[in-house]
Amino acid sequence: MQQAEKKDCHFLGRGLSFPPAFDKRTKDLRMVEGPADIRQSLEIILSTRQRERPLAPAFGCNLDQLLFEPITLSFITKLQNLVEDALLLYEPRIEVKGVNIEPDSNNEGLLLINVDYKIPSANSRFNFVYPFYLEEGTDLDGQ
């Protein structure tokens, strides 16, 4: 069954795993394809700052410019627009159906960015959650 899935998703692309990892048996770099490749691409887009890649200076999302901002309606709207624009520009294999941002009730300073998307060529819907930390993770033990 896995072999059939691999053949069906080949048209979605294939790339290096993120983060890069080696196969213990063959010592080759691990590869991902299909929906897993797209999912890792979304993580790369959202975690990359613009101008971070010398050969693609416009690539990325610049979420870091929103660190330490108070959570207001305008902040949430700006964050949604940044994510939607970055995905529209840098992941043509998907159709973004919605971006929803919610504070994590268990962790203060953590926002969960929910991306609901469709892969039109495979006629499949997926959901991706990206954790966005607004505050530095220091003094976690409360002392």
Image (cartoon, grey):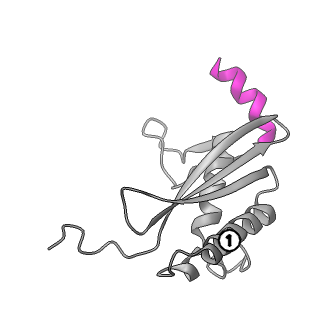
Furthest residue in direction top, as rendered: 1
**Is 140 left or right of 114, judged from the image as shown?**
left
Based on the picture, tell me whether residue 3 belongs to the magenta stretch. yes
Give percent across and percent down for residue 125: 73, 38
Who's the residue at 73% across and 53% down the image?
A: 98
Q: Which residues are magenta?
A: 1-13
Q: Amino acid at mark 1?
A: Thr
**Is 27 left or right of 13, judged from the image as shown?**
left
Q: Nearer the viewer, residue 7 or 68?
A: 68
Who's the residue at 41% across and 56% down the image?
A: 105
Does residue 121 appear anywhere in the picture? yes
Q: Looking at the rendering, which quadrant does residue 80 occupy?
A: bottom right
Does residue 13 appear anywhere in the picture? no
Who's the residue at 61% across and 65% down the image?
A: 46
Based on the picture, tell me whether residue 56 belongs to the magenta stretch. no
Who's the residue at 37% across and 76% down the image?
A: 136
Residue denoted by label 1: 77
Secondary structure at badge 1 equals: helix
Q: How many discs appear?
A: 1
Q: Nearer the viewer, residue 12 or 42?
A: 42
Q: Quadrant of the N terminus?
A: top right
Magenta residues: mostly which secondary structure? Answer: helix
Q: Nearer the viewer, residue 25 or 10?
A: 10
Q: Looking at the rendering, which quadrant does residue 75 occupy?
A: bottom right
Give percent across and percent down for residue 39: 63, 48
Furthest residue in direction front, as rendered: 73
Q: Quadrant of the C terminus?
A: bottom left
Q: Looking at the rendering, which quadrant does residue 83 occupy?
A: bottom right
